[in-house]
Amino acid sequence: MVLKIQDFCQKKTLTRLLTINNPLNQNRIKIIMTAILQLYYQFVSFCSSVFVEQSQKLALALFSATFPQEIIELSKQFLREGTAKILVKKEQLTLEGIRQFYIAIQQEDQKFKVLVELYKNLTVSQSILFCNSKKTVDDLYDKLTTEGFTVSKIHSQMEQKEREQVMQEFKKGAARILVSTDLMGRGIDVQQLSLVINYEFPRLKEQYIHRVGRAGRYGRKGVAINMVAQQEANLLLEVEKYYNTKIDEMPKDLAEVEKELS
């Protein structure tokens, strides 16, 4: 039996799922889908203790496009000895079909002005705008709405039902822009999504491929634009080296970018 855990971050949900008396345990197998961020950010010690306690009562499989070294080390605490590991070399993780650009931002307060100009001059059906914090998501949502754009927002502090409603409406085309934290960096497919903008560069290089991978789905081309402040420049260089990829400077003539979006 395959279980898709929608609200893995909540302690009570995870505990209830793994409780011995839970009828689901009769199936004796749990497949945790894209659980890496949740393990890494908030509940590392909690998840570790639960999995160790239940390790003899369930089979556990972890799936993700990327596995930070910290997660590999953590998994050794609750995966059984002799567990099969299928790890793809990072050089084989592909960004094929996604054209990547960066915009060098001299001053942090210039970012929003540049962002507005991008949206006014590029023909984009839908896009995801990634930020590193809930506060930035809320601020951008308010500012973009004031500028007259149709915008939705999503982050982990919203109720699950509210998040699901936002995603349903976004997939139906109710908003042109979805402002999000890394909550939407994995497992989200929107057919008409052609552009990803990193308003704030991801703190973890492993997260970069998850973010930009939201564009160019279903065999289509996609574009990723990285707005890079001076203090983020080293992070961009790390990503280029880590994935053996090239992120070009944004051309002044946006016609080249338009070709990739069409």
Image (tube, rainbow, N blue to C red):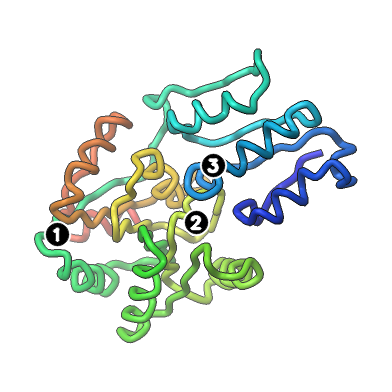
Q: Identify the secondary structure beneath mark 2.
A: helix
Q: Identify the secondary structure beneath mark 1.
A: strand
Distance from disc 2 to disc 3, alpha carbons, whole Å, reads: 20 Å
Residue 115 screen position, x and y as percent: 25, 68
Distance from disc 1 to disc 2, alpha carbons, whole Å, reads: 25 Å
Residue 245 screen position, x and y as percent: 28, 34
Which three-letter amino acid code belongs to the residue tagged 2? Met
Is residue 112 found left or right of 205 in the rendered image?
left
Write down the residue under mark 3: 44
Q: Earlier in the sequence, mark 1 or mark 3?
A: 3
Residue 96 screen position, x and y as percent: 38, 37
Query: Vertical placement of 16 versus 154: above or below?
Result: above
| Local crowd size for mark 3, using a 10 Å CA cut-off: few (<14), some (14–19), many (≥20) | some
Kindly identify the residue that appears in the image at 63 percent across and 17 percent down: 84
Write down the residue under mark 2: 184
Write down the residue under mark 1: 105
Which three-letter amino acid code belongs to the residue tagged 3? Val
Which three-letter amino acid code belongs to the residue tagged 1? Ile
